[in-house]
Image: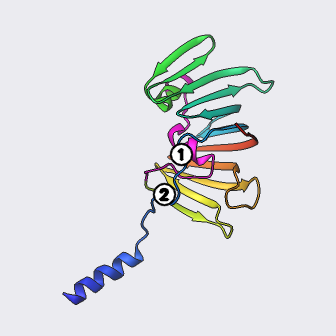
Amino acid sequence: MRVALLSLFLLGACSTTPVMLERAPQADAAFAFNGRVAMRQEARRESTNLRWTHRGGGDEILLLAPLGRTVARITVDASRATLETDGKHYAAADAEALMQQVLGWRLPLSGLRYWVTGLPAPQMRHEKTTGKNGQIGELRQQGWTIRYSRYASAATDALPLRLNLQREGLEVRLVIDEWTPL
């Protein structure tokens, strides 16, 4: 019996277990940023500027042309998502599926809302590696691998400026040019 318990203990010590969230982000913490996003999947490549505003339980994401003209407007709240582009309005319960249907690509908005602030999505399993200063270097969650390559400063709670997301042949690069306090 002791040998079996010792074996189980040693096997458990050698395995990598995803950790749960150590600090819970405030679900109502507001943020806004301007940035650029580039997507690559096989031979297809797309890039756009974006402006993301999050307040309470809602998000507004503007996809912008190089001169600032709004190409698409995505609005998400707890019950639905809408997407406006080329004068047409679309709605669905799931923002990611709506983006895939209308734009032909999707951003993982449910997790990305947290990842852009340098935090794992709450109440979901994740694995992460941190640097000497406590900032996340790499995060794995919801099937995505998120690599943080630049932060606004060396402080532990600094906001990220560059993220690279990968999942199943899709690569998304996000550069945040400006964080705006709300």
* Residue 47 image offset from top left, x and y in percent: 69, 34
Q: Amino acid at mark 1?
A: Gly
Name the residue nearer the viewer: 73 or 172.
Answer: 73
Which dot marks residue 169?
1
Question: Visible in this render: residue 48?
Answer: no
Q: Which residues are magenta?
A: 101-124
Q: Label 2, on which residue?
A: 21
Between 44 and 172, the residue placed more toward the observer is 172
**In this picture, residue 75 sits left or right of residue 34:** left
Residue for point 48% across, 57% down: 21
Q: Is 122 included in the stretch rendered in magenta?
A: yes
Residue 75 on image: x %, y %? 56, 25
Q: Which mark is residue 29?
A: none
Of residues 19 and 175, the one nearer the viewer is 19
Give the image location of residue 97, x and y in percent: 47, 29
Q: Which x, y percent locates residue 23?
A: 53, 57
* Vertical side of 134 occupied by 149: above or below: above
Residue found at the very far left of the displayed protein: 1
Question: For the residues carrying marks 1 and 2, which lies nearer the camera in this image?
Answer: 2
Instruction: Report crowding for label 1: few under 14, some 14 to 19, many 20 or more residues within 10 A (C-alpha).
Output: few
Label 2 amino acid?
Answer: Leu
Identity of the residue furthest to the bottom in this view = 2
Query: Does residue 67 show up magenta in the picture?
Result: no
* Left or right of residue 152: residue 45: left
